[in-house]
Image (cartoon, rainbow, N blue to C red):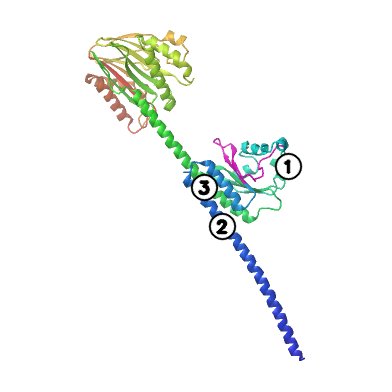
Amino acid sequence: MNPGIILLLAFSTASLLILLYLLRSQSGIIKQLRHQRDAIEIEEHRMFDFLHGLGETLIKEGSTQTTILHRTIVRGAAMVVDTHGAALYLLDKTGGRLVPQYQSEACPPLIPIPTHITQQSHDAPNTLGSYVRLTSIGCEWGPFGEALSTEQPQFIEDLSAEKSFESADLECHQGVSVIVAPLIYGSKKLGILAVANSSVADRFTKNDYDVFRSVAEQSAFALGNALIHHEAAEKRRLDQELNTASEVQRILLPDKDPEVKGYRIAGLNVPAKLVSGDYFDFFEIDDQHLGVVIADVSGKGVPASLITAMCRSVVRANSIDTLSPSRVLSKANVQLFPDIREDMFISLAYIVLKADSPEMQMARAGHDPPLHYHASEQTVTTLQSPGIAIGIDAGNVFEKAIQDQKLELLPGDILLLHTDGVNEATNSHGEEFGMDRLYKALVNAAPGGATEVIESIRDAVEKFAGNVTQNDDITLVALEKC
């Protein structure tokens, strides 16, 4: 055969072999690319399912059912990364400890397990799971603390080789690989999310690390939003309770001024907050006598308002068939003392007046001295009767200190009872309304009677304070002798 033909055939055969090889190689590459594409699609579907699950949980549960959200995050993280298990730890209210919230069943322990716990688990299989679910860990501990402090995910190839696991039962942690990611919402650190594999053969890849970082970011966003919704819901609940408490307290205050022959009486309470630590009260002792009370509980808000309600009931109960104010307050002190905190007390003034009589009796339990406006002289004097506040002493000292004081009002005279929220009201310069302004307001308004006195003093304090928010309640009671 012609050598040229032989050479041509050889060349053609070689070309065909090369072409077959290239086709086979290309087919392998195509299969590999298809496999990678399928893997990416599966990963994308997992991520989509995870995000969809988070969204559904936030919408359906109103962002308040945190247990369901925690479970969704943990199971979703394990699914997306395709790992053996995952766990969620969140910081407690102090920010000092990481508390386990949810851990998937197949997740290996991620905190050091003492040897005695693993030994007990041989006889009681639930011991290990209970220990993991109930054991919190310091926020600076090991890989958890490292993730929080650096604000970066941490990858641990083998937990048993970690220094923070030296005192643990290493067989329990042998070969466990973990990725720990911090959960941060804005500038607030919430806790950590971790995924783990218990087999040496299932090591995490760089892609696993990147995907898990995204999962942790989305989880932190969901948890942060849930926290905001929870705090908003809690605030709404507290506001509703405060409004209810405020309504109840308003019901306890007199709904109208009393009608007593020979007197005109007016009262006013302006709370600094929704609920007040001040109160005033008018009540019939018998068909001839009226009890008048003004009180100020140290402290503000709900605790003070609860004490005022207690005080009102106790004073009323002890006033039945008793015309001595000091005796009533002594009994009230004995009954209230055990229930008042050491840092709280009640200043109170109690007056008993008789219809169509100029004489009355007063006892003052550490309250601001009442002001007596003398119509004939157009002057004001203070009534400094002895006594200490309710709740300071169990009984003996209180009873020795408090006394009844007899008063007499002439026609046109006014007795003004007030709490320190009046004279201590401040303006934008930090100045107090003070007693001098109170004296002046009383003298100017007194000719108009009890109601005019109350309204004028309130207006004077509001004008003085301007837009400055006051820290103390304002309460006034005026008794005018006709």
Q: Are marks 1 and 2 in contact (CB under 8 Å)?
A: no
Q: Quadrant of the C terminus?
A: top left
Q: Secondary structure at mark 1?
A: helix
* Residue in the picture at 49% in, 46% down: 58
Find the magenta span and give its range. Answer: 86-115
The residues tagged by marks 1 and 2 sit, at their Cα atoms, a distance apart of 36 Å
Quadrant of the rendered structure where residue 406 is?
top left
Query: Which sits earlier in the primary sequence, circle 1 or circle 2?
Result: 2
Q: Residue at x 55, y 42 (%)?
A: 190
Query: Nearer the N terminus, badge 3 or badge 2?
Result: 2
Q: Is 313 placed left or right of 290 in the picture?
A: right
Crowding at dot 2, Cα within 10 Å, few <14 / some 14-19 / many 20+, comes out as few
Residue 41 versus residue 393: which sits nearer the camera?
41
> Which residue does the numbered mark 3 point to in the structure image?
221
**N-term mark: 1 or 3:** 1
Quadrant holding the N terminus: bottom right
Q: Is residue 391 visible?
A: no
Is 94 colored magenta in this rendering? yes
Disc 3, SS: helix
Q: Secondary structure at mark 2?
A: helix
Q: Which mark is residue 44?
A: 2
- Residue kind at label 3, given as amino acid type: Phe
The image shows residue 108 at horizontal and vertical percentages of 66, 44
The answer to if 349 sits in the magenta stretch is no
Q: Position of residue 20 (x, y in %)?
A: 69, 76
For the residue marked with disc 2, what is the amino acid? Glu
Residue at 64 percent across and 55 percent down: it is 206
Which residue was labeled with disc 1? 170
How would you rate the neighbour count of disc 1 (Cα within 10 Å): few for under 14, some for 14-19, many for 20 or more? some
View extreme (bottom): residue: 2
